[in-house]
Image: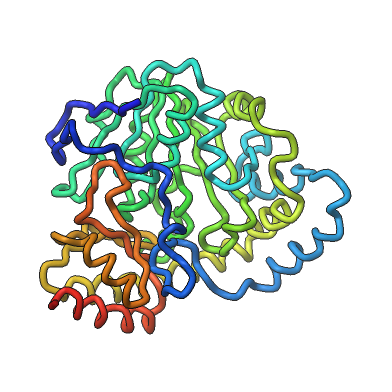
Amino acid sequence: MRAQPIAGRPGPPIIPSAPEPDLGHHGDAEATPGLVDLAVNVRRAPMPEWLADPITAALGDLAGYPDPAPARAAVAARHRRPPAEVLLTAGAAEGFVLVAQALRGIHRPVVVHPQFTEPEAALRASGHQVERVLLDPDDGFRLDPARIPVDADLVMIGNPTNPTSVLHPAADVAALARPGRVLVVDEAFADTTIAPGGAGEPESLAGRGDLPGLLVIRSLTKTWGLAGLRVGYLLGAADLLDRLAAVQPLWAVSTPALAAATACAAPAAVRAERLIAARLAADRDHLVARLAALPGVRVVGQPASAFVLVHWPGADAVRRALRERGWAVRRGDTFPGLGPDWLRIAVRDRATTDAFIPVLAQILEA
């Protein structure tokens, strides 16, 4: 089933004979053992005691079935929403599957690309005919709400977007909401964003209960290094979440994952996120400056998350050369709207960046 491009403001050309991107390819496939991992966007740091202790304690309760109520209440309190507007999931990726399965009656689903490929993959696996809006790299992959078809009854977009690291203004994303449409906003990396004044998640819609059909999908696996635990949640109107819950497997979120969700929703955890996001911003600025100094390398737009997207001719050959020298970065050709001349690079600490850039420079010179 081939996704169809949507006419609109000119963007990157779509070549009909080009092979479909591999939507099932993810960064973990690049980060094989022995390589320095700049391909996966999960923060790697020692787990704080306030998070490790409740997860460890939960292992003593595995004989009982998981009770999501405390975690649901904690997440609801964090976002100032009633518990009925929270649905806990086994990672953000499960949320895309629930949307695809529960909303089989939609007629025109649209996915805004480039973005994380699982939303489209889930839709296609459930039999939906997906249409794509491809954002323009020459415009910094910025969202133009006017490009979304008026009759689209499902729209999926990331904010900040993986892999572009673009943070769309909340007003532009909110402009996509309307009666008769479900608007799914993937905010898996929202907790990595910070405003210049220090405010966290400056463009998040997680607290908006006034927008019709809005579903916000969140992840706890990125900042807190919990990819192996699988924990995330959806925020939206109670009746819409009820439709998704009806197709969710029973006890989908494990007891340790629920303990993690409760801990990460606490005010102290949210404050810690802000500090981490501020350090991340400084490390990202350092990476961007070092990359921009390399001849022929273009960093796209103003990166706002835990990764940057770069472009130069022959980038995929450089990626392979980096692997030979012990470094893993994320290929770009598996994202609709990109191609082999794009790479995504995860933000790491300055020491890692300063070790990486000379290797990259040597390859480019060769």
- Residue 267 drawn above or below residue 71: below
Q: Nearer the viewer, residue 79 or 304?
A: 304
Tell me the quadrant of the picture where the C terminus can be found. bottom left
Measured as percent of width and height from the top left, residue 201 is found at 44, 55
- Residue 331 drawn above or below residue 47: above
Q: Nearer the viewer, residue 4 or 44?
A: 4
Left or right of 12, for residue 269 = right
Q: Residue at x 27, y 65 (%)?
A: 319
Q: Residue at x 71, y 45 (%)?
A: 73
- Residue 366 drawn above or below residue 199: below
Tell me the quadrant of the picture where the N terminus can be found. top left
Question: What is the tally of numbered marks visible in this picture?
Answer: 0
Measured as percent of width and height from the top left, residue 125 is found at 47, 29
Measured as percent of width and height from the top left, residue 303 is found at 29, 60
Residue lying furthest front: 324
User: For residue 360, what is the image quadrant?
Assistant: bottom left
Measured as percent of width and height from the top left, residue 197 is found at 38, 65
Q: Residue at x 22, y 49 (%)?
A: 339
Left or right of 178, for residue 364 = left
Q: Residue at x 42, y 73 (%)?
A: 35
Coloration of the structure image: rainbow
User: For residue 66, what is the image quadrant?
Assistant: top right
Left or right of 341, for residue 132 = right
